[in-house]
Amino acid sequence: MNEEKMHVLKIKPNDNLFLGDGKRFDKGESTWLESRLMPYPSVFYGSICSLMLQLNQKRSNRYINDTKDKEDEYDDPRKSLTIRNIYLYDEENRDVYMKAPLDLFINKYRKCRYGSFKKLEDNVKGSIVNGELNYFLFNDKKNFQRVEDLYIKKSSFENGYFYDREIDFYGIDHFVTKDYKVGIQRKNGMAEEEHLYRIDLTQFNDRKWSYLVEYNIKDEWWKESPSKKLEQGYLKLGGENKSCKYWDVSHEEILKKDEEIENYKNLSNRVKIYISAPFISKKGFLVDFKESKESKQPIKVLGVSNKKPLFIGGYDMRAREHKPMYKAIPEGSIYLLESEAFQTTIKEIKEYIKDQMRAENSLIKSGFNQFEIIPYRMIEES
């Protein structure tokens, strides 16, 4: 499988943003809408698609007017755009942040403990059991709680979590200040009953914060506008189409791959998979692997540490209707996998898992279903 070369876009909001959590805003029903710190990948995907049309007027005119032209099959920007991982970025200190893995535990002093997977019959106290699986996550230390809605630095993930070392955690208030607005629907100048609403907003607490988005646009897209590639400018983001400034920062190598990790040799037939972006599968994550038994080296899901699913929808402006609502595994979730194919490098394991998954390519192209591989160390089971 040939991996697309990823560029990096830095996106800095100029104002507070409404980044919906998937709930529909139906008049008279939804009265309180929450805003996420990390937007769903589809938010960035749609925003960059709109920017691509803005920067290429010939393709935009044909696409908007629905002009059919066999020679210009790439007028739909979605056929040319791929995005991958999305991060929070501290420009001042050049620190990149991601969701904390959900197999970690923390006490009030922010000390870190790694959860262990145990067989179900062990019946150990402090366990987190998940349905039909044979292994469960547990913590044997008092006063430690599993991490919830915390973030870690990408450098901590690579140098700490990957090797079972100490990690620092950061809460949402490290990045944003709470803000909201209240409104009411009016008709003929009069307030309507049951139409009062509150919308929470995402507002960074310092100008140093921005988002980083890995992306790739096929060169074919720019053949009629070669000078209009994404360098810097403005795009619209969020439910209220707020203006954000963007820069292509690929040359800064902020998200440079760690070759040592990529080439790390896993010594067992088990690994942990860290979900780095909401994972959508119409059949369900477990089914994807259970139905891979026809493979010579099938993948088995042994255990999981996650939390309640996300519900991801949206609104199709072109069709003027709600998009289908999907259930997704939240970022930070950890799955324990087993396969005879796993005694190789991390890079090769990742490619093997991708080949075994049958998730829709459109979801992967738009930034969903991203993951990282972590070695499974047998000491966890002792």
Image (spheres, rainbow, N blue to C red):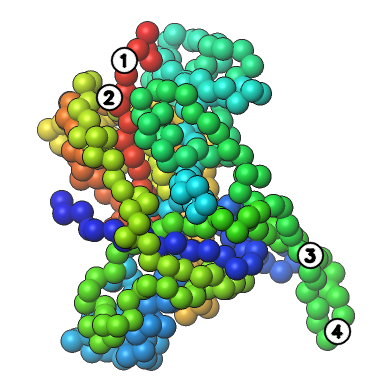
Q: Residue at x 52, y 43 (%)?
A: 309
SS at circle 1: helix
Q: Indicate the amino acid at tag 1.
A: Met
Q: Using the numbered discs, state the Cα–Cα distance from disc 3 to disc 1 in whole angstroms.
A: 53 Å
Q: Is residue 161 left or right of residue 270?
A: right
Q: Is residue 212 left or right of residue 39?
A: left
Q: Decide which of tag 3 and tag 4 comes sooner along the chain.
A: 3
Q: Using the numbered discs, state the Cα–Cα distance from disc 4 to disc 1 in whole angstroms.
A: 68 Å
Residue located beneath label 3 in the image: 182
Q: Decide which of tag 2 and tag 4 comes sooner along the chain.
A: 4
Q: CB atoms at circles 1 and 2 under 8 Å apart?
A: yes
Q: Decide which of tag 4 and tag 1 comes sooner along the chain.
A: 4
Q: Decide which of tag 1 and tag 2 comes sooner along the chain.
A: 2
Give the image location of residue 240, x and y in percent: 62, 71
Q: CB atoms at circles 2 and 4 under 8 Å apart?
A: no
Estimate how packed mark 2 is, as few (under 14), some (14 to 19) or many (20 or more) residues with alpha carbons within 10 Å: many
Q: Decide which of tag 2 and tag 3 comes sooner along the chain.
A: 3
Q: Using the numbered discs, state the Cα–Cα distance from disc 3 to disc 4 in whole angstroms.
A: 17 Å
SS at circle 3: strand
Residue located beneath label 4 in the image: 189
Give the image location of residue 211, x and y in percent: 49, 57
Q: Indicate the amino acid at tag 4.
A: Gly
Residue located beneath label 1 in the image: 378
Give the image location of residue 358, x and y in percent: 26, 49
From this view, report whether residue 315 is shown above or below residue 112: below
